[in-house]
Amino acid sequence: MQQLRSINFSDIMLNYHMEEDSKCSLMVKDHILFYVYSGEVEVNENGKISHIRKGQCTFIRKDHRVSLVKRPKEGEPYHATVLRLTRKFLNDFYRKLEPDQLPDNSRRSKTSLLVLPADRPDIQSLFESIKPYYYPTVQPSEKLIEMKMTEGVYILLHTDKNLYASLFDFAQPWKIDILEFLQNNYMYDLSMEEIASFTGRSLATFKRDFSHISDTTPQKWIIRKRLEVAREEIVQKGRKVSEVCMDVGFKNLSHFSRVYKDAYGVAPTK
């Protein structure tokens, strides 16, 4: 049986500890900085695979979709700490900066995942200093957590000056193409509020814009897309129904079979 410990402080510092492989897909809503004490994590970003191993630290930019496989390695459990850099925290940090601290030629990087050098003492020192606070006898204060988060931001800024532009870009995200987003993310369990946010819109604006490009609702569009992909995978490629069901985003095989038969007049197993 998998042994999993997840400890969270103030929604900005998170610790994971697990002894079996764990797989998840997520939309990264806030910038994150994470450090692997032991084990490794495999990060899949649109087909590009990166392996983050023991002693490595990685930055993942917000508003980005990744799939993670966390696994133990060489007899040690997967153990990592995540610093979640929220908009509020970065806003407060930015207001304390002096104007002469801001580089003139910083440009927002298009890189969504940045692996930091593994031999930096400042990185090792920060994350080793965090470890004691995951034990019940030692509880960090809000001020101490803030100090650790601040240290993490300075590590990033000392790594690449272009991260100034990425971390402190507080403008609302540009609207992105709705259909392109749905084509790439139809298989994920996202609420309408989340989809609206990830495409740079309020929920009301998202619904209005969607009505201009489709004669159906977003929910029905997603179901139809999932069924179209599932049918191609089953009929054209001969894949197993149970595998396809989960891959396209259905949680329940019986529900998938029912809506598939309603759409195509035949059960997927036929």
Image (cartoon, rainbow, N blue to C red):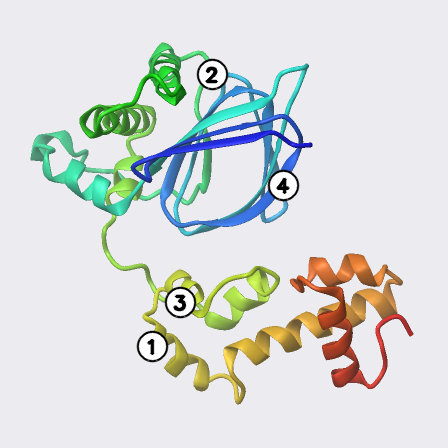
Neighbor class of circle 1 (other Cα within 10 Å; few <14, some 14-19, many 20+) is: few
Placement of the N terminus among the 4 image quadrants = top right
Residue type at mark 1: give it: Thr
Q: Alpha-carbon distance for marks 4 and 3?
A: 24 Å
Q: Earlier in the sequence, mark 1 or mark 4?
A: 4
Q: Earlier in the sequence, mark 2 or mark 1?
A: 2
Q: Alpha-carbon distance for marks 3 and 2?
A: 38 Å
Q: Which residue is mark 2?
A: 118
Q: Residue at x 58, y 67 (%)?
A: 183
Outermost residue, bottom direction? Answer: 215
Neighbor class of circle 4 (other Cα within 10 Å; few <14, some 14-19, many 20+) is: few
Q: Which mark is residue 28?
A: none
Q: Which residue is mark 4?
A: 23
Q: Alpha-carbon distance for marks 2 and 4?
A: 24 Å
Query: How far across and down, in percent of the image, does residue 187 sit?
Result: 62, 62
Residue type at mark 3: give it: Glu
Nearer to us of marks 2 and 1 is 1
Placement of the C terminus among the 4 image quadrants = bottom right
Can residue 107 be seen?
A: no
Q: Which mark is residue 193?
A: 3
Q: Which residue is mark 1?
A: 205
Neighbor class of circle 2 (other Cα within 10 Å; few <14, some 14-19, many 20+) is: some
Residue type at mark 2: give it: Ala
Q: Residue at x 35, y 73 (%)?
A: 203
Q: Secondary structure at mark 2?
A: loop
Position of residue 260 in the picture relative to residue 9 (left or right):
right
Pointer 2 and pointer 4: residues touching (CB < 8 Å)? no
Q: Earlier in the sequence, mark 2 or mark 4?
A: 4
Q: Alpha-carbon distance for marks 3 and 1?
A: 11 Å
Can residue 205 be seen?
A: yes
Residue type at mark 4: give it: Lys
Position of residue 118 in the picture relative to residue 220 (left or right):
left
